[in-house]
Image (cartoon, rainbow, N blue to C red):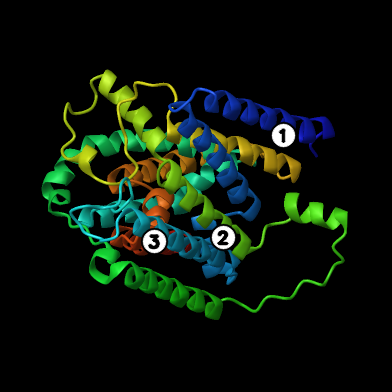
Amino acid sequence: MTHPTIRFGLPLLLALALAWGFVTLNGQGVEGRPLALSLLLGAGFGAVLQRSRFCFYCNFRDLIEKREASGVIAILVALAAGAAGYTLIFGAWLPTPALDRLPPTAHIGPVSLTLVIAAFAFGIGMAVSGSCLSAHFYRLAEGSVISPFAIIGALLGFGLGFLTWNPLFLAMTSNAFILWLPHHLGYDGGLLLTLAALALLAVAALWWARPGIPAPAVPLTLREAVERVFVTRWPAVVAGLLVGGIATLAYFRVAPLGVTAELGSIARTVGTNQGWLPSSLFGLDGLRGCATVVKEALLSNNGLFVIGLVAASFITSFLAGQFKPRRLTGKDVVRGLTGGVLLGWGAMTALGCTVGVLLSGIQAGSLSGWVFLVTMSAGILASWKVARMLRLS
């Protein structure tokens, strides 16, 4: 059991550090304000992820194995809320949706066999390591012994991704196409089709799930209200709406949500400076997604977003008493590094992960997000099937 001084003192120190960082960056004028907002949005995102257990892999596993639908419903609500928010922004910025003038910075990515392979590998990496990359960041704050090695593995995977990029680009990615729903159906039609698809998935999830036992009514005292905010898992709809709202605000003010650009930029910078990577990565910097660049500045929007995510997750996990590390084993190291390499390679090659491609892509009306969702799920299911076969052999 965590000592009360640590349980409440550390969150206070982290909250003060976040507040100091926000005020300091915001005081730097035009250049510092996006950085300050990125830190704040990352903190909000991390708090919601940790408090609601918003994890693509964990929620998918709960639905398939435990037949619990609440986590998947949270994801679907987030996609729906974000899609509506994105559509409002697109309509205000670009009255006519056209492929030759896509919404600025939106993750409307290319679709090719490369994306299918990368998303499939990412799904396997999720199954091996036990989480997607965004969840590994908040699981650090819960004391996960696998997550640090998964993140290290992801850095290595990004490096491998840069090494394999040129052959894959020449063979497959160069022939990729972009399908943006509003261009073909208009903003209203694109949003309606997205919401209809999400509604069908929600109906399927609820049909598959076992009926839950209604929780007994409890008078909403001050103690109960505090428990609901800081200890118990947040309701699916609330979590989904918050994620969708954060995604919309992030796109409107800074950039689409994503958690891998900083990892990729670190790997690309180190690899370039050491001469390990090709001098030219064909077409990479002209494609939409979680952009990786050779870092020149210490601080970046995505880097501060991830810092805020991890810090806020520590705050909420300590307050909830959910920081519970266990003894590290060799199996944990192997799982983390192996799964992390697959996550990193898949995220680099797909130009993002479950947040950057799936979440931000579907919300933007891009086919690439749906392709990532389907093939990632196939990778998870294939991993489970192989694991069951190996246990039987």
- Look at the picture and state if 27 lies above or below 359: above
Q: Earlier in the sequence, mark 2 or mark 3?
A: 3
The kind of residue on which mark 2 rests is Leu
Q: Position of residue 309 (x, y in %)?
A: 56, 39
The kind of residue on which mark 3 rests is Thr
- Look at the picture and state if 273 lies above or below 357: above
Q: Earlier in the sequence, mark 2 or mark 1?
A: 1
- The residue tagged 3 is 87
Q: Position of residue 2 (x, y in %)?
A: 79, 36
Nearer to us of marks 3 and 1 is 3
- The residue tagged 2 is 241
Residue at image coords 44%, 33%:
301
The quadrant the N terminus occupies is top right
Q: Earlier in the sequence, mark 3 or mark 1?
A: 1
Left/right of residue 316 with respect to residue 89 in the rendered view: right
Determine whether the residue tagged by mark 1 lies in a helix, strand or loop.
helix
Nearer to us of marks 2 and 3 is 3
Using the rendered image of the protein, determine whether residue 191 is visible from the camera's viewpoint.
yes
Per the model, the C-alpha gap separating discs 2 and 1 is: 25 Å
Per the model, the C-alpha gap separating discs 2 and 3 is: 16 Å
- The residue tagged 1 is 11
The kind of residue on which mark 1 rests is Pro
249 or 43: nearer the viewer: 249
Using the rendered image of the protein, determine whether residue 145 is visible from the camera's viewpoint.
no
Residue at image coords 69%, 43%:
317
Left/right of residue 81 with respect to residue 48 in the rendered view: left
- Look at the picture and state if 260 lies above or below 247: above
Residue at image coords 68%, 75%:
212
213 or 368: nearer the viewer: 368
Determine whether the residue tagged by mark 3 lies in a helix, strand or loop.
helix
Determine whether the residue tagged by mark 2 lies in a helix, strand or loop.
helix
